[in-house]
Image (cartoon, rainbow, N blue to C red):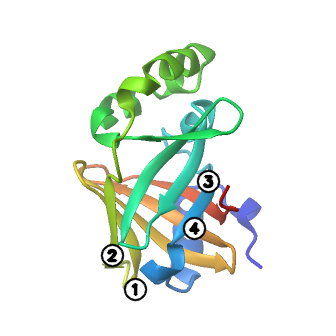
Amino acid sequence: MFHLDAVSCEADALALFDSLPPVLPAELIGLWQGHGLPTGHPLDGILENLGWYGKRFHGDRRADALLFRWGERRLVPIDPAKIPVGLALHLSGFGRSRAGHNLFSHLMRGLRAHGPVAKVRQVGFRGVESAAMAYDRKPILDHFRRLDDHRVLGVMEIAGDERHYFFVLERAPET
């Protein structure tokens, strides 16, 4: 078992990530619930504040990259192409605020994806081939490594930004 609470910065998270075994794309198929792994990245806490649920990976190697909660029981896929990542990074404090949460909940309908918005493939990252999710219309890759039979550690790599955002996905029951 890996101790995620021992991770406190990007260097710790990268060391943990590098120590983990790879994941095959087929092993990701299904619904996953996510949460950020705080390392000091500007996105820390934003997704959770906005109601992020996780990701869904389909058998055809396509993916719903960002699933958000809508009410008590509904999940809504969001199209990341409609979100200005640079602005989100610069306004991270607003993204963690109640006002940010309220604004996002009003914008969610217009941000909705109409089908999967990413593809899953094997990609080399930090010397290991493992499953990664490439966003269709954003220069973003999410790389995955196995924590255990039910969890993976993800690291988001945004082109042009040297920092990495870390998150954990845990297999969720399909409902």
Label 4 residue SS: strand
Question: For the residues marked 2 and 4, what is the alpha-carbon distance in whole angstroms?
Answer: 16 Å
Give the residue at mark 3: 34
Question: Eyeballing the image, is 42 above or below 106?
Answer: below
Question: Eyeballing the image, is 58 above or below 23?
Answer: above
Label 1 residue SS: strand
Count the marks.
4
Q: Please, what is the three-letter code of the amino acid marked with disc 4?
A: Leu
Give the numbered dot on residue 153: 4
Residue 69 sits in which quadrant? top right
Question: For the residues marked 4 and 3, what is the alpha-carbon distance in whole angstroms?
Answer: 10 Å
Question: For the residues marked 3 and 2, what is the alpha-carbon distance in whole angstroms?
Answer: 20 Å
Which residue occupies 76% across, 70% down?
3
Question: For the residues marked 1 and 4, what is the alpha-carbon distance in whole angstroms?
Answer: 14 Å
Q: Please, what is the three-letter code of the amino acid marked with disc 2?
A: Arg
Q: Are marks 4 and 3 in contact (CB under 8 Å)?
A: no
Mark toward the start of the polypeptide (2 vs 4): 2
* 94 with respect to 120 (left or right): right
The residue lying toward the viewer, choosing from 75 and 171, is 75
Q: Are marks 1 and 4 in contact (CB under 8 Å)?
A: no
Residue 13 sits in which quadrant? bottom right
Q: Mark 3 packing: few (<14 Cα in 10 Å), some, or many (20+)?
A: many
